[in-house]
Amino acid sequence: MDHLENRHSFAAVIGDIKDSRHLENRKEVQDRLQRVMDRLNRKYKEDIVSKFLITLGDEFQGLLCGGKNILSMINEIKMEMYPVRLRFGVGIGPITTDIQTEMALGADGPGYYRAREAIEVLKEREKKNRSVPADLCLKMDETDRGKEVLLNTVFDLMYAVESGWTARQREIIWDMLAYGDGQQNTAARLSISQPTVQKALAAGSYYTYENALKNAAEILGEIQYD
């Protein structure tokens, strides 16, 4: 199997399904998650060093060569899996073992340690019953502590905005994010009027959210394996 070895920084992504044991349709959810993983591996093949795969019944992971499309991938997973709730840990750092390109298994190093640590941070926050627990946490090297704190604060605020969306606002906003071709086209796809789209975007703080997403993605885009 193809593999490579490197000690440069990569972006490890670990995700899992919240409260998966309580899902009534667990097998259906797992099958849908597998289809999402397969689609991401095709769509973002230029970014992916080790393909996304389900490692346990409710957990999945992948390894990326850079950070520019991390948030796009996470958003697509969230959109495809909704209303199933997910959490995501991202770790930036070296991988010190062989990397298998066909599956994100067996590799180890600070990148994965930090992604796992990020997942545990989210779980601890949930246990403490924070009113708006985040669904995404990033861990980086100590030298990037300021950037890490800033990005995680942005992720927390974005999640707080998301949590206030109605079902209709979420549908409209996610269409705008997915296609990016304007209010008229979103209205046509959803068979609603353009003023309805505009009203939903304003009520859901869409442009503030989109700007935060874009700026966070630009910062993550600076992470690139040489």
Image (spheres, rainbow, N blue to C red):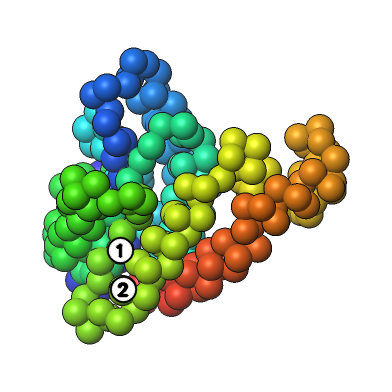
Mark 2 — residue? 148
Going by the image, does 161 lie left or right of 120? right
Crowd around label 1: few <14 · some 14–19 · many ≥20 (10 Å): many
Answer few, some or many: residues within 10 Å of disc 2's Cα (few below 14, many 20 plus, some between 14 and 19): some
Tell me whether circle 2 and circle 1 mark residues in contact (CB < 8 Å): yes
Residue sitting at x 28%, y 51%: 130
Residue 76 placement (x, y as % from top left): 51, 45
Check residue 138 in the rendering and tell me which mark sits there, or answer none. Answer: 1
Is residue 179 toward the left or the right of residue 78 in the image?
A: right
Instruction: Residue 8 in the image: state x and y as whole percent.
Output: 25, 73
Residue 102 visible in the shown view: no
- The residue depicted at 85 percent of the width and 40 percent of the height is 193
Q: CA distance from mark 2 to mark 1?
A: 6 Å
218 in relation to 98, above or below: below
On screen, 211 above or below 89? below
Q: Which mark is first along the chain, 1 or 2?
A: 1
| SS at circle 2 | helix
- Relative image position of residue 25 (x, y in whole percent): 37, 16
Q: Left or right? Give the position of 174 relative to 21.
A: right
